Structures are given as C-alpha cells and as structure tokens.
Amino acid sequence: MAEKKIVLSEDKRLIATQEKNVKDEYRFSLFEFKGYKLAEIRVYTDSDTYQGPTRSGLTVRVDALDAFIANLEKLRAAAKEEGTEQSPLLQTNYKEELNHGKQRKIEYPHTDRL
C-alpha cells in the first residue's frame, strides 16, 4: 500500500469544521495572500493515499464576506421555500450537466439524502 501524503498549511487559521461525508470535511479558515485577507471554505479528505485539501472549495475576500453571507441567506430561504423533498431530477440515476456547451450524463447512485 502506498504511503499517505499529508499536506498541512501553517498560514491558515482554522475557524470551524463540518462533516461532509465519511472521508471528507469542510474546513472554514482565514488567511492572508498577497496582502488580501481571505476567508476560505475548502473540502479536506482523508483517503487511503492522500490526506489534505482538495481543489473543491471557495475563497472570498474578507471585505466581501458580509455580502457573500447575505446571498447565502437568500439561497437558504429559497431552498426552504422549495421544500425539503428530493428533486425529481435527482431521483433518477443520472443528471444532465452543461459542460462547455455539450451535455453529458453523469451517473449518481440513488440516495435517501442529499
């Protein structure tokens, strides 16, 4: 078995974590880059071959964080209005996505939760 690669970042201040699934978690951090103060939500993984940050995540300048959070609140309100039942599209075993002007089918396993 290959040795696990561990990636650590000492310049980020970890604020909170939230479980995504069995192997992944969201990490909420603050850090500075090229003079900008940034807030980041990044997916970290703990797999058999790699432990550390993934490419999945987002970074927002701290000075834009209030507006960003206000838009997240709007997103949450809209999601609540739509209800908690699973979308009919997600009840099928595929989802069509637009990829550079071409549609492709992506297989998804059936799941009881989103």
Image (spheres, rainbow, N blue to C red):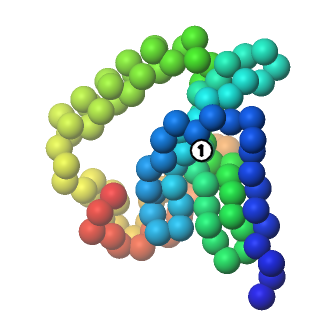
- Specify whether 7 is left or right of 91: right
Residue 99: where, in percent of width, then height?
A: 63, 48
- Specify whether 52 is left or right of 103: right
Q: Can residue 32 be spotted in the picture? A: yes
Location of mark 1 (residue):
42
**In front: 110, or 55?**
55
Residue type at mark 1: give it. Arg
46 versus 44 height, above or below: below
Q: Residue at x 58, y 39 (%)?
A: 14
**In front: 51, or 83?**
51
- Specify whether 70 is left or right of 5: left
Q: Residues within 10 Å of mark 1 (few under 14, many from 20)?
A: some
Where does the C terminus fall, quadrant-wise?
A: bottom left
The residue tagged with tag 1: helix, strand or loop?
strand
Residue 109: where, in percent of width, then height?
A: 42, 73
Q: Residue at x 47, y 69 (%)?
A: 22
- Specify whether 107 is left or right of 88: right
Q: Residue at x 44, y 50 (%)?
A: 18
35 versus 42 height, above or below: above
53 versus 78 height, above or below: below
Q: Residue at x 57, y 11 (%)?
A: 63
Where does the N terminus fall, quadrant-wise?
A: bottom right
The picture quadrant where one finds residue 108 is: bottom left
Residue 11: where, in percent of width, then height?
A: 74, 35
Q: Number of marks in the image?
A: 1
Residue 66: where, in percent of width, then height?
A: 45, 15
Q: Can residue 102 be spotted in the picture? A: no
Q: Residue furthest top?
A: 63
